[in-house]
Image (cartoon, rainbow, N blue to C red):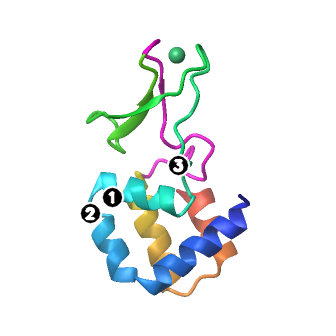
Amino acid sequence: MEIESRLDRIERIVSEAPTQILDITRFHDKTLEFLKDSSLLKSESPICNNCTNQMSLMHNKNKADRFQYRCRSCNIAKTIRYNSIFEGSRLTLIEFTRLMLYYFIEGYSIQETHEETANNY
Ligand SMILES: [Zn+2]
């Protein structure tokens, strides 16, 4: 899915229910679920690069986002941010999502919001 249509989609969700997004982003698991539903994160688990088995979503309290994908055969881990707009950001998913919400509420355009959140954080 193109970045523009992903952001269109999240803008619609956010504008329909801003207080709901604030509630959702109090929790790591709900934020993850929301970002998957919004197609900002991949909803399917990745394939292990080593053995090609499907990886599993695992809880990991040492990770800022509290989750990661792990191959049960090789024990290789992969970030839940793979191939997403969140790759490379220093913000947690919760911080990033709240920042996007803030920009939408402040009336920034989709393009401005993407540029601000992707390039500066
Ligand atoms: Zn593997």
Disc 2 marks which amino acid?
A: Arg
Crowding near the residue tagged with mark 2, few <14, some 14–19, many ≥20 C-alpha atoms within 10 Å? few
Across and down, in percent, residue 66 comes to 32, 41
Element under disc 3 = loop
Q: Is residue 47 magenta?
A: no
Q: Is residue 30 left or right of residue 54?
A: left
Element under disc 1 = helix
Disc 1 marks which amino acid?
A: Lys
Q: Name the residue that disc number 2 marks.
A: 26
User: What are the residue bounds of the magenta stretch?
Assistant: 73-91
Q: Is residue 107 left or right of residue 94?
A: right
Q: CA distance from mark 1 to mark 3?
A: 13 Å
In percent of the image, x 26 and y 63: which residue is there? 26
- Is the C-beta separation of discs 2 and 1 under 8 Å? yes
Across and down, in percent, residue 52 comes to 61, 19
Q: Quadrant of the N terminus?
A: bottom right
In percent of the image, x 47 and y 18: which residue is there? 76
Q: Is mark 1 within 8 Å of ligand 1?
A: no
Across and down, in percent, residue 25 comes to 33, 64
Q: Nearer the viewer, mark 2 or mark 3?
A: 3
Across and down, in percent, residue 33 comes to 40, 56
